[in-house]
Amino acid sequence: MQRRVLIVVFPGFQLLDMAGPADVFGTATLIRRDAYQVEVGSVSGGHVTAGNGVPVVTRPLAEVTEPVDTLLVAGGPSVPERLADTALVGQIARLAGGARRTASVCSGAFLLAEAGLLDRRRATTHWLVADDLRSRYSGVDVDADPLYIEDGDVWTSAGVLSGVDLALALVARDHGHGLARNVARGLVVYLHRPGGQSQFSTAMRALTPRSEPLRELQGYIDANPAADLSVPALAARAGMSQRHFSRVFTAQTGMSPGRYVERSRADTPRRLLEVTGLPLDAVARESGLGSPETLYRVFRRHWRISPGDHRRRFQSKER
């Protein structure tokens, strides 16, 4: 029996918040015919225009009386003004009460919170609006770092394309990782990422330095994780004293040199595990981490999964 997925939208929603998950569920159904039935609903039904001007045909939410397996609420730039839409919030609350699970993409978490669905739950959203979610809804345990979070029967995800990661995780939960991997390949998505992975790569976490020498040094660090990246070595490369270098680097990137190096070295083994067959000791050396033991500690701290588990779940067979 097909699992019914209802995606809730509203005027000004983020098109990718709807289209990304819809394509994941749709591709799963092309591979396995009985996987999902996807519908898009809104308060009034009919054509609803996304924030980028693209219209989408929707079904009135009040007409949805049959069981819903997965209720998924999109986000978008118009969410702040939609929080006062009692009809929308009320329909979300009603439909969630009968759904097996409820999920949101990006700022759709605000609508779940407004409907009372995130009270005393851990949740995530786009990092840009996480502080607003935290301050507006004190009963929600907001974690702005993960790509997606599962807390009981409620799932929340981070910004925009993390909705694809969320949907792939739901497919994996329903039908196994094999189908989720095949869907990812069909959509030419790089890999199905675990929810515990951070929303940010090292480059995204750090500010871009104003100084050209520091921008070049930042690129050098990312490209050469196994090099000597100690503060004395980096300061010498930048032509500065160690004290001045540390102060300027921290001021212009938002993190200390040592913290930037550690995060950059944490990014490298993730890529190597996904696209190479190198043994763990070689991955550790290539990443500048020295030993498998250090690799394990750093990997668990940054990506919340062991190196071996990450490789087994997400390695591309097309390397």
Image: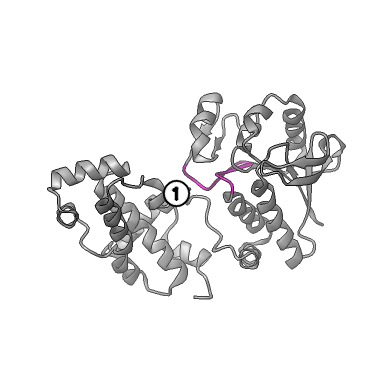
Q: Position of residue 11 (x, y in %)?
A: 72, 36
Q: Residues within 10 Å of mark 1 (few under 14, many from 20)?
A: few
Residue 274's place in the image compared with 212, above or below, is below
Residue with the mark numbered 1: 200
Verify whether residue 310 appears in magenta. Answer: no
Residue 238's place in the image compared with 287, above or below, is above
Residue most extreme to the left: 241
Res. 142 visible in picture:
no
Verify whether residue 158 appears in magenta. Answer: yes
Q: Residue at x 38, y 63 (%)?
A: 269
Q: Secondary structure at mark 1?
A: loop
Question: Is 12 placed left or right of 248 in the picture?
Answer: right
Q: Which residues are magenta?
A: 145-160
Residue type, numbered disc 1 = Phe
Q: Nearer the viewer, residue 87 or 313?
A: 87
Q: Position of residue 42 (x, y in %)?
A: 78, 38
